[in-house]
Amino acid sequence: MKRMLSLLLVAALGVLAWALPAPEAEESPTIVPRAVVAVASNHSTCPWAFSDGAIDTFFVAQTDEDADLRFTFPVGGKVRKTVEEPQIGPAATALSLAAVLNQGVSPAVVEFSSGSSAAGIVETGEGVLAADVCPSALSKIWHLPGGSTLEGQTLRLVLFNPYSDDARASVAVTSEAGFEPIPELESVTVAGRSWKVIDLGKLLPLRESISVAVDMKQGVVTPAMVLSEGDDQAVWTNEGQADQWDFPVADAGGLTPRLSISNDGATPVDYEIDGYSTTGAEIALLTGTIDGRSQVQLDVSGLAEGVFGLRLRTSGPVAATLIADDGVRVAATAGVTVSATRWMLPGFGLAGVSTLWVMNAGAETTTVTYRFLDAGGALGEVEKVAVLPGRVLAVPTVPIGASALVVESSYPISVAWTMERDGAIAYASAVPMAGQ
């Protein structure tokens, strides 16, 4: 009876939430720091997912407690499909888009009835691998640095409106040439329960670095940036602003990492980039200044030999994305703006070799425990590692049947993960759990 009442409640809430008009833009927070994007919310919005005969996307819903899950797929102004699942937590359910809709691009909303929760996507196919966290907050302004439209690259901006009312946004684009005036992006309307895909490569070809700011004028959208290089693809979403960003993985091995930073404020911002290696070897320090209303993309491949992570500190709020590629493979991720002792990694273990990256910027050795999850709960035993102060630790795994990871530590840490399979690679940030 309790389960039935819970399901009825979740269904009622879902109908109510997506039938009502979207909140007015002026009532939304002006800036959403990454730290609160996907921490303990009753829903997450996944603006990018793709499925056809060769590629599939998995939506992963991870919960710390028992919860009822609802996956909603709006198409053309209507809710086309819904999938409901009960989940006994801690656990993580992975839903194949191909099993629900097989029509190309198909964003979705994931709802949770209770508990600390997070959602993510994993896109996989021959030579294709991408992963990202699905945002769970609304924002009046979204910041997405990290794009490029060089030869052999395709860059798309996706605007997803899950609500019944139309949304309208102004999209501002800056590149290495400065502000790029694009009349058709000054006012972009996205109909209710639909999405719009904008090919930035056609509008701005041969740009080395592109940063996008989406300013809501009416209603709500959730954006995503999708960068294709060779057959591989990278996806990243919701960039807030902060004065500190951690990237526990910059170079996972054999890639050229670049750090893209955007300053949408009117005044210059000073930055400082510290590196953390797996060996404790000394890493060069990068410093500089970013002019107001501009962006930079920094090649950080020479900071250290081997694999390493980064911490970006600035004198004012900025947005930042880490991109890594080699002409065939491409990966990208937003950083994290907090250190925490409990983390969720939705999607970890779904394909190939998944590697946990832990960055300990503190002064004490920290003990880290982690455990794999699937829809039925915990898989295997709790694993334990120690991370020395001022170091990054990479923990490669080949989990069979897992769809998420839960990580805990004795001292605050920063966490990310990577995935490799069939010559493709993906980077993704982790989600700090509620109460941190």
Image (tube, grey):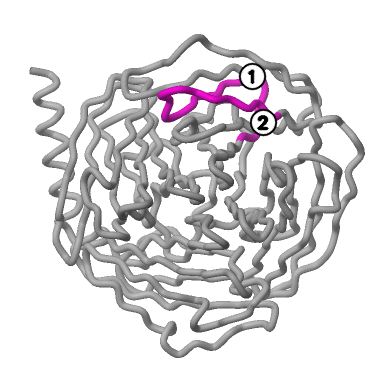
Q: Name the residue under label 2.
A: 358
Query: On the rendered image, what quadrant is the C terminus found in?
Result: top right
Q: In this view, does 15 lie to the left or right of 146?
A: left
Q: Relative to 332, say whether 427 is above or below.
A: above
Residue 305 location, quadrant: top right
Q: Name the residue under label 1.
A: 368
- Span highlighted in magenta in the image: 394-415
**Residue type at the position of mark 1:** Val
Residue contact between numbered discs 1 and 2, judged by CB atoms under 8 Å:
yes
Q: Determine the residue positioned at 49% across, 55% down.
A: 235
Q: Determine the residue positioned at 86% across, 45% down.
A: 304
Return the disc, 1 or 2, that comes first in the chain's sequence: 2
Helix, strand or loop under label 2: strand
User: From mark 1 to mark 2, how far is it between C-alphas?
Assistant: 9 Å
- Image coords of residue 352 (percent x, y): 52, 34
Helix, strand or loop under label 1: strand
Residue 286 location, quadrant: bottom right
Label 1 environment density (alpha carbons within 10 Å; few <14, some 14–19, many ≥20): many
Q: Nearer the viewer, residue 362 or 188?
A: 188
Q: Which secondary structure type mostly characterizes the magenta part of the structure?
A: strand
**Residue type at the position of mark 2:** Val
Q: Determine the residue positioned at 69% across, 56% down.
A: 326
- Image coords of residue 402 (percent x, y): 43, 25
Q: Relative to 151, say whether 68 is above or below.
A: above
Q: Which of 285 and 351 is in front in this view?
A: 351
Q: Determine the residue positioned at 20% across, 67% down.
A: 165
Q: Which of 432 and 369 is in front in this view?
A: 369
- Image coords of residue 205 (percent x, y): 57, 81
- Image coords of residue 111 (percent x, y): 27, 41
Residue 403 shown in magenta: yes
Label 2 environment density (alpha carbons within 10 Å; few <14, some 14–19, many ≥20): many
